[in-house]
Image (cartoon, helix red, strand yellow):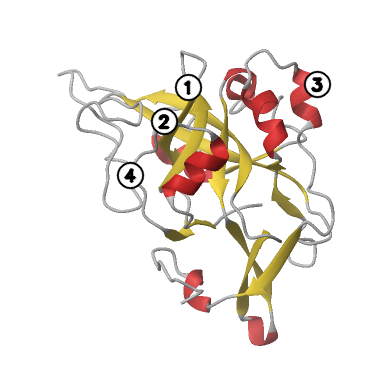
Amino acid sequence: MCGRYTLKTPAPKLIELFHTPQFPDLTPRYNIAPTQRVLVIRIDPENKRQALLARWGLIPFWAKDVSIGARMINARSETVSEKPAFRQAWKKRRCLIPADGFFEWETVAQRRKQPWLIHMNDELPFAMAGLWECWRIPTDQNGTLSGSPPVPSSHGMSSTGGNNPNGETDSMLISCTILTTQANDDVRPLHDRMPVILQPHQYECWLNEDSSNQQRLDLLQPLPNGSMSRRAVSTAINKVGNEVDFDA
């Protein structure tokens, strides 16, 4: 699975790599966790790439409240096209989720857990295959929003309170999930699953609404063995909310 990751690459480099003209305001993130707002890249109605922030943990359009999202941070690539929570997003709402590393934990002596950062050998950012969904926040009988507090953010930003540049409105909330596949040899010593990481030449096929079901399924493979490196990092990462620069 993928339950924590990093994105500390400056926006100009991300714009260059993902060919997206504008980005929302970003600060370096060293410990991104579920339910926080994360960067995603999708295709907009004009068929151009659009970068925006979405809540990590997909909330299906039919959900009654946001709580289900905490259980939907990952989608298994083997069953994603069949699961009711992901079926519609799989067909029409795919996205890229940029990262420059993700964490897995190893249980060591005396049940202590050691976090490991896994990254590309060249340490460049990469794109995890994702799905996004738009969920209508319910209103009460007086027409005011109910059933959902403002969405937790990475740095105090909430998703309610008017139109915003992330494509959300007072009554709509955008959320996302990360697809996973079997781990390759680089990750398997720590976990039997890893995020689906797409190569740049695969981005267009993944995002394109016209790609076939089989074309999309063919992309959901582990990276070749030897593509990634890992290193042990501070156990301060274990606590959600600790934004620790482990390279400092």
Q: Which mark is residue 174?
A: 2
Q: Out of 51 and 140, give the one closest to the viewer.
A: 51
Whether the residues at callouts 4 and 2 have beta carbons within 8 Å, the answer is no
Marks 1, 4: nearer the viewer: 4
Q: Position of residue 236 (x, y in %)?
A: 47, 76
- Whichever of labels 3 and 4 marks the residue nearer the N terminus, that label is 4
Amino acid at the residue labelled 1: Trp
Q: Is residue 103 above or below residue 93?
A: below
The residue labelled by disc 1 is 62
Q: Quadrant of residue 180?
A: top right
Q: How many numbered dots are placed on residues in this image?
A: 4
Marks 1, 2: nearer the viewer: 2
Amino acid at the residue labelled 4: Asp
Under tag 4, what secondary structure?
Answer: loop
Q: In the image as oriented, which residue stretches furthest toward the left?
A: 142
Q: Is residue 34 above or below residue 78?
A: below
Amino acid at the residue labelled 2: Ile
Q: Position of residue 193 (x, y in %)?
A: 74, 52
Q: Which mark is residue 25?
A: 4
The residue labelled by disc 3 is 214
- Whichever of labels 1 and 2 marks the residue nearer the N terminus, that label is 1
Measured in 3D between alpha carbons, the distance from the residue under mark 1 to the one under mark 2, in whole angstroms, is 13 Å
